[in-house]
Image (spheres, coloured by chain):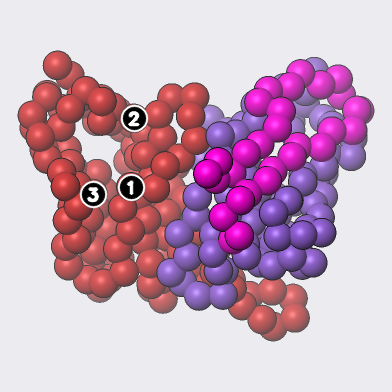
Chain colours: A red, B purple
Amino acid sequence: QKEVEQNSGPLSVPEGAIASLNCTYSDRGSQSFFWYRQYSGKSPELIMFIYSNGDKEDGRFTAQLNKASQYVSLLIRDSQPSDSATYLCAVNMRAWDYSGGSNYKLTFGKGTLLTVNP
Amino acid sequence: IAGITQAPTSQILAAGRRMTLRCTQDMRHNAMYWYRQDLGLGLRLIHYSNTAGTTGKGEVPDGYSVSRANTDDFPLTLASAVPSQTSVYFCASSDYAGGPYNEQFFGPGTRLTVL
């Protein structure tokens, strides 16, 4: 069973702090990794993706990938109350169908609830 | 540009009734997906379509069917609804499912309650 694991939280940080969200995955062959943000009652919104080992920065967000450790993380700098949401880690895993063909499917973690306190 | 639209926004349905959830995208994406999201279980894939005319089963396909007659539309049908199908349903799309670098974009969701 291919899995993606996240701490459910809640993770609570003060405004202006760095929030660190972590994710581990089981499929060593995975090649692409995504972070989605989901506000309560809304749909998931893609905020970051990372394909290569190392760091990828986009504004206040940094995604970090370590394929050897099968670990991906999301750092949010200068956290704001508007960052309060559930963050979903998703890993693109190869799936085989009954005819022997393959394609890629996203497997989601259950999400980490982040609360940024003013 | 609307992206992905879903209808209805919410629905209360009697058990045993047939229901079709609609999903339309205007991004000309090849692949489309249906997920359900339940508290404590996360997002789970129901069915997918890599391209118009093809469909496949996801993690939790029982009780659901899909069709993909064209690129834009991907309806999900519950033939005879049961209370365990109470959930929030999300439609998503991506440009291409044949490689690993396919970012998926989600519609606004349909909240379905089966009584």
Residue position marked by numbered label 3 in the rendering: A74
**Which is nearer the eye, A1 or A82?**
A82
Mark 1 closeness class: few <14, some 14–19, many ≥20 residues within 10 Å: few
Label 3, secondary structure: give it. strand
Q: Are marks 1 and 3 in contact (CB under 8 Å)?
A: no
Residue at the (70%, 60%) spot, across then down = B71
Write down the residue under mark 2. A85
The residue segment tinted magenta is B1-29
Q: Amino acid at mark 3?
A: Leu
- Comparing labels 1 and 3, the label whose residue is closer to the camera: 1
Q: CA distance from mark 1 to mark 3?
A: 10 Å
Residue at 69% of width from left, 74% of height from top? A97
Chain identity of mark 1: A
State whether residue A100 is above or below residue B108.
Answer: below
Magenta span contains residue B82: no
Using the numbered discs, state the Cα–Cα distance from disc 1 to disc 2 in whole angstroms: 12 Å
